[in-house]
Image (cartoon, grey):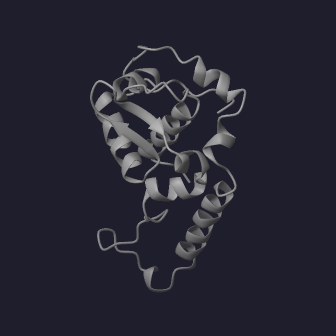
């Protein structure tokens, strides 16, 4: 299963905020720059995370972003389910009629595999994901490093 870019970014934002000091509230633009993504995309992700109660987003002079207690303690599986939505691994709709749709065992097998994927993430929290060495990397993210694209994946990701 492949996560959407939206979910991937949502997880990265929450991880970034999890290592931020209690008195530090970075702005959306700052976090977008640090994670090398567009501000417009970042704003949509932050809006959804705020709706879920994972991030506290405030405007103005004393504004900025902060992770909430729910954001620290919610399971990664719970968060991924909400960011990904209720879609299935394969879409069996009227657009591409499938002669197997009425009694397809593949569809139910893929649905079970998808749930097993989410369940495997249920035992993890964002705090689990932000331990060292990841914590060290998150704390060292260069501010203002916006390049317009995500950093290249490494073998360790």
Relative to 142, does residue 57 appear above or below in the rendering? below
Question: Could you say where residue 150 lies in the image, as x and y percent from the top left?
Answer: 46, 27
Relative to 1, does residue 103 appear above or below in the rendering? below
Does residue 2 appear anywhere in the picture? no
Q: Which of the image's four quarters has the N terminus?
A: bottom right
Tell whether 112 sits left or right of 103: right
Q: Residue at x 70, y 33 (%)?
A: 131
Nearest the camera: 64 or 128?
64
Residue at the far bottom: name it.
Answer: 102
Question: Could you say where residue 133 lies in the image, as x and y percent from the top left?
Answer: 72, 26
Question: Could you say where residue 73 lies in the image, as x and y percent from the top left?
Answer: 61, 50
Relative to 115, does residue 9 appear above or below in the rendering? above
Q: Residue at x 30, y 74 (%)?
A: 94
Relative to 103, does residue 95 appear above or below in the rendering? above
Q: Residue at x 34, y 30 (%)?
A: 63
Q: Which of the image's four quarters has the C terminus?
A: top right
Question: Could you say where residue 119 lies in the image, as x and y percent from the top left?
Answer: 65, 62
Q: Residue at x 29, y 24 (%)?
A: 61
Does residue 67 appear anywhere in the picture? yes
Tell whether 114 sits left or right of 5: right
Nearest the camera: 142 or 110?
142
- Residue 84, by quadrant, is bottom left
Tell whether 113 sits left or right of 71: right
Disc tally is 0
């Amino acid at each position: 299963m492949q996560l959407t870019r939206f979910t991937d970014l949502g997880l990265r934002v929450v991880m970034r905020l999890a290592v931020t000091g209690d008195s530090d509230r970075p702005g959306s633009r700052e976090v977008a720059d640090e994670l090398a993504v567009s501000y417009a995309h970042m704003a949509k992700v932050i809006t959804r995370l705020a709706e879920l109660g994972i991030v506290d987003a405030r405007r103005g002079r004393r504004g900025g972003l902060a992770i909430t207690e729910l954001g620290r303690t919610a399971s990664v599986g719970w968060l991924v389910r909400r960011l990904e939505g209720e879609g299935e691994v394969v879409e069996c709709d009227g657009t591409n009629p499938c002669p197997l749709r009425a009694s397809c065992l593949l569809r139910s097998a893929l649905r079970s595999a998808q749930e097993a994927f989410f369940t495997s993430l249920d035992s993890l929290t964002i705090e689990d994901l932000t331990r060292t060495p990841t914590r060290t990397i998150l704390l060292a993210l260069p501010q203002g490093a916006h390049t317009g694209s995500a950093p290249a994946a490494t073998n360790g990701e």
